[in-house]
Amino acid sequence: MQEFLTINKFSDEDSYNNLLYILEKDGIPYQTEVFRERIEPIYLTTLPAEYHVKVAAEQFVRVNELLYKIAAEEISKVDKSYYLFDFSDQELYNILAKPDEWSAFDYQLSQKILADKGKAVDADFIATLRKARLENLAKHEGKQSNQVILGYLFAMTGGLVGIAIGWNLRTSKKTLPNGEQIFNYQENDRKHGLRIQILGIFMVIFWILFNSIDYIKEAF
């Protein structure tokens, strides 16, 4: 079965519907997830609605290029009061260096503003920036010493929290802008995650059996 991965998240419904329209018009299969009422677990505050759009991993590049193409046609109509015209050259280059953090429109407009100033934004330069960004995003998180220690402690007490920590260390992944999925954590931390899961499951079973023995003794 083909796996669909989140390519974009929106906080406003109009942008969400616009992307769905584009995907449908181009015949690109998609799936959606809508979170209309959410509660922040720590402070118990109400979070705004969030709209997720998912496509197959091999469609990521196609969808992004499609969005860039549409945006390139729209930037000629932008008003000079648009906030990017107040950005410095360095700020505009930062947008080009991190296209996954900005809309396709802002990305394309940044290129145009720089080009109009006579700055370097040719195809080779853009390709170099995209490659560097992918390489940076593909790096694993740093060593998770604290999370590993907490995982073992919770696992030893038979808590399900330990199993959850182990599962997160072992399986957590992130999706790159090109649709590739990679593990968040280093291989050694993922090995600890597996051991924490096994230990946690063993301790849960142990405490269940231990308490069952006490219950049986009390019954007789």
Image: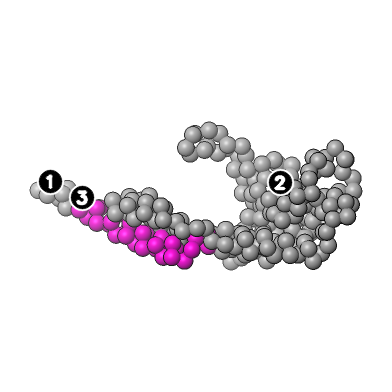
Q: Nearer the viewer, residue 200 or 183?
A: 183
Q: Earlier in the sequence, mark 2 or mark 3?
A: 2
Q: Mark 1 points at which residue?
A: 218
User: Nearer the observer, disc 2 or disc 1?
Assistant: 2
Q: Name the residue under label 3.
A: 211
> Which three-letter amino acid code belongs to the residue tagged 3?
Asn
Question: In x, y percent, where is residue 70?
Answer: 83, 54
Image: magenta residue range: 183-210
Label 2 and label 1: CA atoms lie apart by: 60 Å
> Which three-letter amino acid code belongs to the residue tagged 2?
Tyr
Q: Which of marks 2 and 1 is nearer the N terminus?
A: 2
- Drawn side of residue 118 relative to residue 208, left or right: right
Label 3 and label 1: CA atoms lie apart by: 11 Å
Q: Which residue is drawn at the image coordinates 15% and 49% (left, top)?
A: 214
Q: Nearer the viewer, residue 133 or 91?
A: 91
Question: In x, y percent, where is residue 97?
Answer: 71, 56
Q: Name the residue under label 2.
A: 16
Q: Which residue is drawn at the image coordinates 63% and 43% (left, top)?
A: 50
- SS of the residue under disc 3: helix
- Drawn side of residue 140 relative to residue 157, left or right: right
